[in-house]
Image (tube, helix red, strand yellow):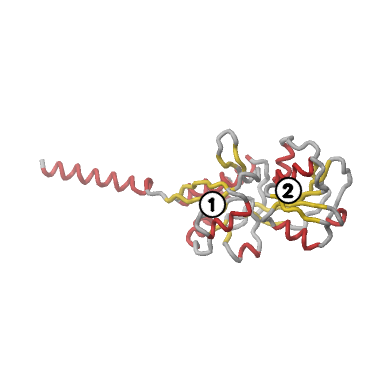
Amino acid sequence: MLVKRLAQFLLAALLLAAAAPASAEQVLKVGSTPTGIPFTFLDTKTQTIQGLMVDLITEIGKDAGFTVQIEPMQFSALIAALNANKVDIIAAAMFITPARKEVIDFSDPIYTYGEGLIVPKSDAAEHAGYDDFKGQVVGAQVGTAFVDALKKTGQFSEVRAYDTIPDILRDVNAGRLKAGFADYPILAYNLKQGGFPEVRIVESYKPTIIGSVGIGVRKADQELLGKINASLAKLKANGTVAKILDKWGLKAQAS
């Protein structure tokens, strides 16, 4: 009887030990934005943040052995929240830039693109660059690389910094803004939804800032960065990244 009970005890202990890794899986907080579709956005039906970057970091977590808890916040607050330990990862439409790399680290590039230009539909000109808007009021999203680039030209009477890209679209739609500059895929996706009928994207415009989106981590978290990059490489190789991009209307790019 004693031997039988001991065997039962050992079996129970083994079962608990086997279950322990799953129950103890690390949960990491991921800073993401409620605006920025198709990269990230607030799904009003579920009141959760969804999008390309959410799908990607979720799949990376599955492969790397952690689960994610999405924390919504404004784009301009992401880096401060990461370095204040309020979140552990940034997954948003954030360019990898030299200035940002001084304060945080990034994964390998995920998707590369430039800024798009939007104007009122009443403006039918095929604009190619900044010169067409000398002395005008233009806008971009606060915290992005586009604001400083516009200001540095010294060409504009004012560069307005907006909290969100839909805010820029609304002002162009209402005729309050001559031109807006923002992430091309986000502008294109928003316009396809039909919510800004008096806005058009200028296809003749040549972007001046072309960058790659990456996943952000604290500089101290090199082990985490290594896991993210290893999983990202695996997901690129097996076609998962391409499937996620396709789901959100973007084409896979050559590495």
| Residue nearer the viewer, 242 or 138 | 138
Name the residue tied to disc 1. 234
| Most distant residue in the top direction | 45
Residue projecting furthest to the bottom = 102
Residue type at tag 2: Tyr
Q: Quadrant of the C terminus?
A: bottom right
Question: Residue extending furthest right?
Answer: 125
Q: Secondary structure at mark 1?
A: helix
Q: Amino acid at mark 1?
A: Lys
- The residue pinned by badge 2 equals 184
Which comes sooner in the sequence, label 1 or label 2?
2
The residue nearer to you, when weighing 25 against 108, is 25
> What residue appears at the point 70 percent right and 58 percent down from the top-left corner?
145
Q: Residue at coordinates 73% horizontally, 36% vertically from top-left? A: 195
- Of badges 1 and 2, the one in the foreground is 2
How far apart are labels 1 and 2 at the CA level? Answer: 27 Å
In-image side of 102 versus 140 (left or right): left
Q: Is residue 99 above or below residue 70?
A: below
Pointer 1 local density, CA inside 10 Å: few below 14, some 14–19, many at least 20? some
Label 2 element class = helix
User: Residue 81 in the image: x percent, y percent?
Assistant: 55, 56
Q: Residues within 10 Å of mark 2 (few under 14, many from 20)?
A: some
The reply to whether residue 255 is visible in this rendering is: no
Question: In this orientation, which residue lies closer to the viewer: 11 or 121?
Answer: 121
Quadrant housing the N terminus: top left
